[in-house]
Structures are given as C-alpha cells and as structure tokens.
Amino acid sequence: MRRLALIVCLLIGTVAAHAQFEKGKWFVNPSVTGLNFSYNTETDKAHFGLEVKGGAFLIDNVALLLDAGATWQGGGTDVYTLGVGGRYYFNKIGVFLGADVNLNRYNWDGGDKTRFGFGMEGGYAFFLSRTVTIEPAVYWDINKDRSEFGLKVGFGFYF
C-alpha cells in the first residue's frame, strides 16, 4: 500500500511539474561534471568539473541556455568553457535532451589553446519540490582533437 501511495504522489508531482516548463519561466542549473566516469581521449585521465547553466523557456518545453564551466584534469590541464545551447523537455515528465556550441580554453603546462566544441546531453529533471530538481545526465563533448563522454549531476532551480 505504501508503494502505491508513493507512486501516486510521484505521478501527481510529475504532472504538477509541467508548469515549470512553460514559456516565460527561467532556471539555473549548477552541476558537478566528470565524477570519474568520463574518458578524455587526449589526456587519458579522469577529471572533475563544475558547470552552471541558466536559461529561459522560449516556448513550452524548449529552453535557450547559456553555460559556463571549468574542468580540472590530471596532468596539469585545465579547461574553461563558455557556450550557448538549448534543451527540449519531453511530455511534461522531465526527461530532456540538449545540445550546445561552446568555446573551450585549454591551459596546459606547456601552452594554451582555444577551440570551438559541440556538446550533447540527455537526462531527467526529478522534482524534489515545486521549484527544485536533481538532474542526473549523461553528456558527450567533442571538438577537433578531443572526445569526452561522462556523467554529471546537478540541481535545477526553476522560477
């Protein structure tokens, strides 16, 4: 009986969450990236990063995003990122797909590089309250000589 009550509460929460994906709403999404599950073909090492995305819903279920992030990798490599992208939320339930174009600044011990990159992500916005979510996601970032696949976990604040 408890399980049935929990499932009903989760379904009601999911339906009520739709109001957060409407045109005119906006959100902020800080997240921790890497989590030692990603693999960077250039450095062959796991990494840790922080990322912040913010955006507004242009139409229902479609958000325009700005993002900034920093990643610290083993071997003395730091990556700083600025980008713009979008997200699409499916059927009021919080599942989303996103894509972005970004500018990556690499700081190596031996020099610096700046490159354009492309990223994709897919995840789920699980509502803890009417305006706060936990958002686990998988991501794939690619540019000229680097490909990176990983897992990230963030919090979403919807206004």
Image: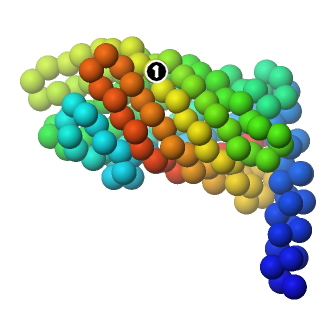
Tell which of 29 and 2 is nearer to you: 2
Quadrant for residue 65, please give it.
Answer: top right
Res. 66 visible in picture: no
Q: Secondary structure at mark 1?
A: strand
On screen, residue 55 versus residue 6, left or right, reads left
**Splitting the image into 4 quarters, where does residue 112 fall?**
top left
- The amino acid at mark 1 is Phe
**130 w.r.t. 56: above or below:** below
Up the image or down, 110 lies above or below 11; here it is above
- Where's residue 76, x and y in %? 16, 37
- Residue 47 x/y as whole percent: 30, 45
Q: Residue furthest left?
A: 110
Residue 98 shows in this picture: yes
Which residue is rendered at x = 84% and y = 49% of the image? 17
The image's colouring method is rainbow
Q: Quadrant of the N terminus?
A: bottom right
Q: Which residue is mark 1?
A: 118
Left or right for 12, reference 63: right
Q: Quadrant of residue 66?
A: top right
The spot of residue 88 in percent (x, y) is: 71, 30
Give the image location of residue 94, x and y in percent: 74, 45
The quarter of the picture where the C terminus appears is: top right
**How many numbered discs sit on the rendered protein?**
1
Front residue (pair 158, 143)? 143
Q: Residue at x 24, y 16 (%)?
A: 113
Q: How many C-alpha atoms fall within 10 Å of the one at disc 1: few (<14), some, or many (≥20)? A: some
| Residue at the image point whose x is 88% and y is 42% from the top | 19
The residue depicted at 83 percent of the width and 23 percent of the height is 59
